[in-house]
Every structure is written in C-alpha cells, then in structure tokens.
Image: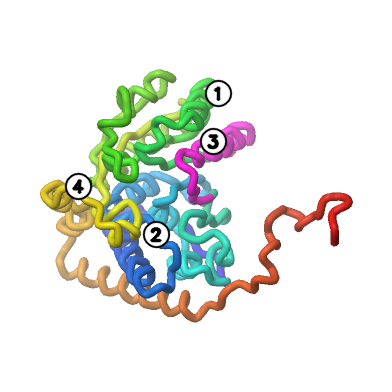
C-alpha cells in the first residue's frame, strides 16, 4: 500500500475540504455502526471539526499529535487515509493498525500520529515525551495533545503540564471543551477553569472559539511558532460542542441531559457551514462531490478488507514478538 502524504491545510478551500471529509467520515461511520459493520460503537466528532482542522493547519508533516477516544477528526486532519481509518474502525486487516486498534486507538507513526487513546488524559504524557525527544534532538518538531474538559481533573494531565513547563518543551495542550464529560456538565465538575490550570504552571493560555476554524488556526499557529522557537509549551481552550451524543449507545439509552434548544443554538454555529459560506458556491459543490466520492471509495475499501486471523491474536504485543515467561507451559 502506498504511503499517504501529510495533509496540507494551507488555504480556506483545503480547510473546508478537511472539515467536510471529517463530517462525512463520521456520518459514514455512524451508518456502519447502525448496520453492525462497526461493533462496539464510536464517539462521534461531529460539531468539533474546527478544532482538529484549525490546529493541524498550524502543523508541519514532521510534527506529532496524540488523540483521544473521540479522535477520528484529529487523525484525518493530520493526514491519515480515510480508507484505512474506516477499515480500522471495522476491525479489518487493511486498517491503519491491521484492525487491532479500532476506533479509540488508531495511529500512523509515519504521519506523526502517535495514537488515539481510550484513557482520559493519557495522550498528554506521550506528547510531552515526544516533545522532550524533539528538544534533545534539536529537530524543531512540535507535539500536540488533544483532550477534553473531562481530563482537566486527571492527575496525569497535571503532571504533563508540570514537566512541559519545567523543561520548556515544544508541546501544545489543546483542551476541547464541549461542556460535558460524558453526561456531566463541566460547570458542575471543574473547580476553577481550564485556563487556570495552565496559568498555575506559568504556561501561556488562550480561550478560542472552537467553532471557528480560522480562529483556532490563528491561535494554534502562534502557540506552535512560539514552541518551535524555544518558547516552551502553550495551552488552547477551544470552546466547542458535539452535536451527537457522547457515544452511539446514547441513541438506545435515550438520555436527556441536554435540551433541544441548547443543541440547536450550537448547530447555528456549525463550523462546516461557517467555512462553506466563505467559498464560491460552485467550488463548494465541487469539493463536496469530491469528498463524497472519496468516502464512497473508503467504504468499499473497508468492506472488501478481510478480518484478522484469530490465530495471530498474540502478534504485535511486543516489539520483538511474544516471549513466554521462563518455565511457562508451551
């Protein structure tokens, strides 16, 4: 399989196309969850696309990211092949990780995607480690870690912030504050604020409209540039909103923790509609058609890929293969 080139998000058209690709990808994945092709469900990224696209537009192909359980948008915006990502969600051998990572653990090291992570806040120390390695190598790379407001009370995030500040590492912390940790309103669970967390460690932090791709890009560009120049870590709090439930299981559970009025008020700020409105209608239609064709091909590719052989379940657990303990029964 050919190596995919990193995403280039250097124009409004390119950024709109990526927004549209992420939105369509998630809608396709939702359909495959409903049909049973994707088992276990997913955490949809619909509504939050501006954060992934805006941040990744400020990165180069050499930079690295860590993602979350709601990570498809980050992975695509960094340049992952939507065919292979969809195959990964479906547990197929042609997936990014041969069907072994699934929705919450997709990675592509060749593109600087160090992996999504099902543990809340767990991507932060990985990104800090990558940033430390870059600092030691002097290679000019920046690392970015995405996390939600639910991670603000996790000790591992605070430890990562501390190390990044102490060692002035080139890492950008991006908090996607969508207002809810699963169904728990952040306002009832977070003492202080996201920006206050960063300020406690002396890390420059800004709040940005996470529904505005260009606003996110501008803030990320400034923070990444400062980090790349040796100015240490930065922190963005992107105020955003997920239009779908925390997880696809919500559709069955019929949870009622958000009002229809609240959801519609945020839908009025849809980042896809906002970015599309700035384009020529004809050009926007061309981009939409191209994305639809790409997603149709991604679905065909994923469905044509086979399932992993259960006999190989113990492969890839260690870098040099599975090694039984001494004295273990063969």
Q: Nearer the viewer, mark 4 or mark 3?
A: 4
- What label does residue 42 carry, if any? 2
Of 320 and 7, the residue lying toward us: 320
Q: Which residue is mark 1?
A: 167
Q: Are marks 4 and 2 in contact (CB under 8 Å)?
A: no
Q: Nearer the viewer, mark 2 or mark 3?
A: 2
Whole-angstrom CA distance, mark 4 to mark 3, is: 32 Å
Whole-angstrom CA distance, mark 3 to mark 1, is: 13 Å
- Residue 198 position (above or below residue 63): above
Of 203 and 259, the residue lying toward us: 259
Q: Earlier in the sequence, mark 4 or mark 3?
A: 3
Q: Earlier in the sequence, mark 1 or mark 4?
A: 1
Q: Earlier in the sequence, mark 2 or mark 1?
A: 2
Q: Residues within 10 Å of mark 1 (few under 14, many from 20)?
A: some
Q: Nearer the viewer, mark 3 or mark 1?
A: 3
Which residues fall within the magenta stretch? Answer: 115-139
Of 12 and 85, the residue lying toward us: 85
Q: Nearer the viewer, mark 2 or mark 1?
A: 2
Q: Earlier in the sequence, mark 4 or mark 2?
A: 2
Q: Which residue is mark 3?
A: 125
- Disc 1 element: loop
Q: Which residue is mark 4?
A: 258
- Disc 4 element: loop
Q: Residues within 10 Å of mark 4 (few under 14, many from 20)?
A: few
Whole-angstrom CA distance, mark 1 to mark 4, is: 41 Å
- Disc 2 element: loop
The quarter of the rendered structure image containing the N terminus is bottom right
The quarter of the rendered structure image containing the C terminus is bottom right
Residue sitting at x 33%, y 54%: 45
Residue sitting at x 26%, y 36%: 208
Whole-angstrom CA distance, mark 4 to mark 2, is: 19 Å
- Disc 3 element: helix
């Amino acid at each position: 399989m050919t190596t995919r080139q990193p995403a280039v998000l250097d124009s409004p058209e390119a950024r709109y196309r990526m927004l549209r690709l992420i939105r369509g990808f998630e809608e396709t994945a939702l359909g495959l969850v409903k049909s049973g092709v994707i088992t276990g469900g997913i955490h949809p990224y619909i509504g939050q696309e501006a954060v992934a696209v805006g941040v990744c537009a400020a990165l180069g192909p050499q930079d690295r990211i860590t993602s979350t359980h709601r990570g498809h948008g980050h992975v695509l915006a960094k340049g992952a092949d939507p065919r292979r990502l969809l195959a990964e969600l479906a547990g197929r051998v042609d997936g990014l990780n041969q069907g072994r990572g699934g929705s919450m653990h997709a990675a592509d090291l060749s593109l600087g995607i160090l992996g999504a992570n099902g543990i809340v806040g767990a991507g932060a120390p990985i990104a800090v480690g990558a940033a430390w390695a870059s600092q030691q190598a002097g290679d000019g790379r920046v690392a970015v870690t995405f996390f939600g407001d639910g991670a603000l009370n996790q000790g591992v995030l605070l430890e990562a912030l501390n190390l990044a500040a102490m060692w002035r590492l080139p890492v950008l912390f991006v908090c996607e504050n969508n207002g809810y940790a699963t169904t728990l309103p952040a306002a009832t669970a977070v003492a202080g604020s996201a920006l206050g967390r960063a300020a406690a460690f002396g890390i420059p932090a800004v709040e940005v409209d996470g529904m505005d791709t260009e606003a996110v890009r501008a803030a990320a560009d400034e923070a990444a540039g400062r980090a790349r120049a040796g100015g240490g870590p930065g922190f963005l709090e992107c105020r955003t909103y997920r239009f779908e439930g925390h997880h696809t299981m919500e559709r069955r559970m019929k949870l009622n923790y958000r009002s229809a009025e609240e959801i519609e008020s945020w839908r009025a700020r849809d980042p896809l509609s906002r970015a599309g409105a700035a384009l020529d209608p004809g050009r926007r239609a061309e981009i939409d058609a191209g994305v639809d064709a790409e997603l149709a091909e991604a679905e065909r590719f994923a469905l044509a890929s086979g399932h992993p052989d259960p006999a190989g379940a113990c492969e890839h657990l260690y870098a040099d293969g599975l090694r039984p303990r001494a004295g273990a029964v063969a």
